[in-house]
Amino acid sequence: MDLQNRNLDKRELERYASLFAVVVFLGLFAYLHSLAVDYPRRGGQFPVLVLRAGIFFCIAYLVYQTIVLQLYPSLKRDENGGMGEYLKGSKSQFDVAIRFKRGIILLTGIIAFYAIGTVNLVLAVFVCYTAIMLALGKRDPKLVIGSAGGLSIFVYLVFVIILDVPLEVF
Amino acid sequence: MVDINLLIAVLENVLTAKVLLLILLGVTYGIIFGVIPGLGPPLAIALLIPITIGLDPVAGLALLGAAYIAAVYGGAISAILLNTPGEPTSVATTFDGYPLARQGKAHIALGVSLLSSFVGGVISLIALVLLAPLLADVAIQFGAAEYFAIGVFGLVVIAAVSRGALLKGGIASVLGLLLGFVGFSPTTGVSRFTFDISYLSSGLSLVPIVVGLFAISEAIMLVDQGGTITSDSDDVAASNGGETPSGEISVPTGSLVEGIREAAKRPGSMLRSSLIGVGFGIIPGVGAAIANFVAYFDLQSSSKESDKFGKGAIDGVIGPEASNNAVTAAALIPTLVLAIPGNVATTLLLGALVFYDIRIGPLLFAETPELAYSFFAAILIANVAMFVIGYFVSSRLIPLTKLPVEIIGPGVIIMSIIGTFALNFQMLDSVLALIVGTLTVMLRKLEFPPVNIVFGLILAPILETNYQRALQLSGGEYGIFLDPGPLTLFALSAIVIGYNLVKAITGVQIMDRVVKR
């Protein structure tokens, strides 16, 4: 029962998040529309058409979610299934704090990759890839070093040798 | 009537150790470029062109043709294993290919994709040989209004395949179209939505956005989920303090041969999708991107098990894969007969043909038939080589889905950064891919389909240019869109919308009855 309530709460939360996102898009489309109508030489003619369609979709979504679904709750089922479940991905194995930590690890690793990439691309691949894997909890040295070494060699062969990407990149 | 002398000359040209070796190298190289996010057929061909300068025309064209078809196929491997289509033409493959991989059936999906790609490629080649001049005549009849209507039809089909999220799909399509409007207007030269940022003035590149939408967003989501691509995360216990669980696979796995057999049981699906690929492939500019979605929609709407689509349907892999490989040779029809390239890759091939001083146009078959048919024979051999090499390469890559996401996720992100950078040597391209990837995670969680965004981006210049051109031709009269050609296509779009609305409404009614019982 608790699980069912939790799932319902989650769906409601997602519904409100979707409504908020659509309101943001509506504001964005309205702002861009105000820019597009002023473009000279009919440069904004087609974008204006598209933006009006976007505004229509947003309003239709808001009306559908806030009015139609209140009157006809059975239509809610139509939202399930389809590609939605694969679009959203599987449920995380981790709690919020660890998920946040993993996000920060990825972000730090990417920033470090750009920084070390200014010195040497292959070195950046090896160091950052190894560090991210270790920080994310992979401790098997054979797997970590093997993966980082393999990717570094692959990057060197394909990007540096074949594509002529300079070693001091970015 | 087969010209025996011509046939012998073609075989002498193609069945040499040098040409066969180049085809094998081209196929291997093409598959690698297709698999890596951010690369793909255009870059694969562009990099080979300088190498082909020293080769004779048959050898050079064989190498380029082999790399071209193999790179298109390579996109399917990463689409299935990592939800990362190398090219827009492989986007629809992710719809059912990736769910199959997540169920531990990557072997089956890859086998289906391999045979479907091969069949699509061969049927397309037959069309190229037999129907090239005839089909090119049809394609040349298309005017601006027809092109606009085809673009609209494409958008409608995309909305139809993203079922359950029609309005969100519409909003995502508008977002994609807006991204396509950034930069100078293709018809008036007016700078739009650039906000005085110099990077935006030349418009947004397609590749960083595709990589961000699919590769980076998927990598971030995998790292967030934990386990492996194939592990069923819902059944795995919660976190153990940041250390990832072993991710042992408990789901059954199939074999590539099993997948090939599954596809072979559905010759009708492969044929239909291949013909759709041929039909759309001959339409320059628009066809390649639309064909895989139309083929997917066609099989989905005609299937008795349409509910399985999006969850791992075999036909959901056959449709996009047979059609996108059917586009490869079909796109050569307007390229060779009319000198109108169908896509970026065929534009580069056209450049190579011009370099070899080959007469492009209707006289190609009259003046240099040996060369033209040798090129086609090389592509046929390349399709066979693709089948064999693809079989072994795909099998070797399947363990990727069994690796922990802590290995796969960061690796995909690093490859995506380098791949998008290498395209134009612009760091901002890779930053754009990262930003798009991060935003896409949020959009995906809220069920805004990323495929609509990429499709809007592709179609924006096509739709706008042809809309403006049609109005110019008609002196501003909107009646041009009601001519028989565009009207037929608009009617087709209306049928697709009507069909989906009826299906959605009746689906809800059936569910109501089930619940009441």
Image (tube, coloured by chain):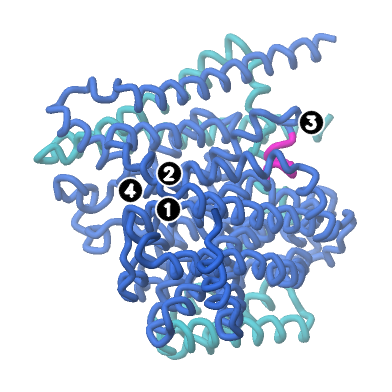
Chain colours: A cyan, B blue
Alpha carbon separation for disc pair 2 and 3:
57 Å
Quadrant that contains the N terminus of chain A: top right
Alpha carbon separation for disc pair 4 and 1:
28 Å
Note whether residue B285 is visible: yes
Please say whether residue A59 is one of the residues in the magenta stretch. Answer: no
Residue type marked 4 = Gly
Residue B490 vs residue A92, the one in the foreground:
B490
Q: Position of residue B418 (x, y in %)?
A: 48, 75
The answer to whether tags 1 and 3 share a subunit is no
- In the rendered structure, find residue B135 and report the number of the disc placed on it: 2
Tell me which chain the residue with mark 2 is part of: B
Residue carrying label 1: B333
Q: Position of residue B237 (x, y in %)?
A: 84, 54
Tell me which chain the residue with mark 3 is part of: A
Q: Mark 2 near mark 1, Cβ–Cβ under 8 Å?
A: yes
Q: Which residue sits at x=36%, y=59%?
A: B205
Residue B34: image quadrant is: bottom right
Residue carrying label 4: B180
Range of magenta residues: B308-316
Q: Which residue sits at x=75%, y=66%?
A: B398
The answer to whether tags 3 and 4 share a subunit is no
Q: Secondary structure at mark 3?
A: helix
Q: Is residue A41 above or below residue B66?
A: above
